[in-house]
Amino acid sequence: MAYRPSHIAAGAMYLSRLILDRGEWDDIIAFYAGYTEDEIEPIVQLMVDYLARPTIHDAFFKKYERKKFLKASMIAQGWARVNARHFDIVDVKLSLDHIS
């Protein structure tokens, strides 16, 4: 990704709040995160797209699907696949390797 680590972290926080239904990205969160909702939307779009598609590199997902990590990767992937259409992601059966 061609984004700063702080930008990616803000996108991950935004996405986790969506998945866990933790409320809006309000002005206070935007102030402390350093990014507005509009500024992190492209990153969240990329993250949801990646999560919704078939897994290419499964080491990351295998690690975080364990009970020790509260099955975080399974929850995130499941949520992304169900909600992909809200992010205008089509044909989620195609892996990123097959998209030009």
Image: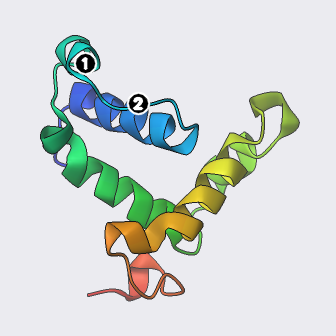
Residue type (three-letter) at the residue carrying disc 2? Met
Measuring 32% from the left and 58% from the top, which residue is drawn there? 46
Q: Nearer the viewer, residue 5 or 72?
A: 72
Percent position of residue 15, x then y: 43, 42
Q: Which quarter of the figure has residue 28?
A: top left
Q: Nearer the viewer, residue 93 or 86?
A: 86
Measuring 16% from the left and 27% from the top, which residue is drawn there? 35
Asked if residue 23 lies left or right of residue 64, the reply is left
Using the image, tell me which numbered label, if any, was put on residue 56: none
Measuring 68% from the left and 41% from the top, which residue is drawn there? 72
| Residue topped by disc 2 | 13
| Residue topped by disc 1 | 33
Query: Tags 1 and 2 in contact by the CB under 8 Å rule?
Result: yes
Percent position of residue 75, x then y: 68, 49
Percent position of residue 81, x then y: 57, 69
Q: Nearer the N terminus, badge 1 or badge 2?
A: 2
The number of numbered discs placed on residues in the rendered structure image is: 2
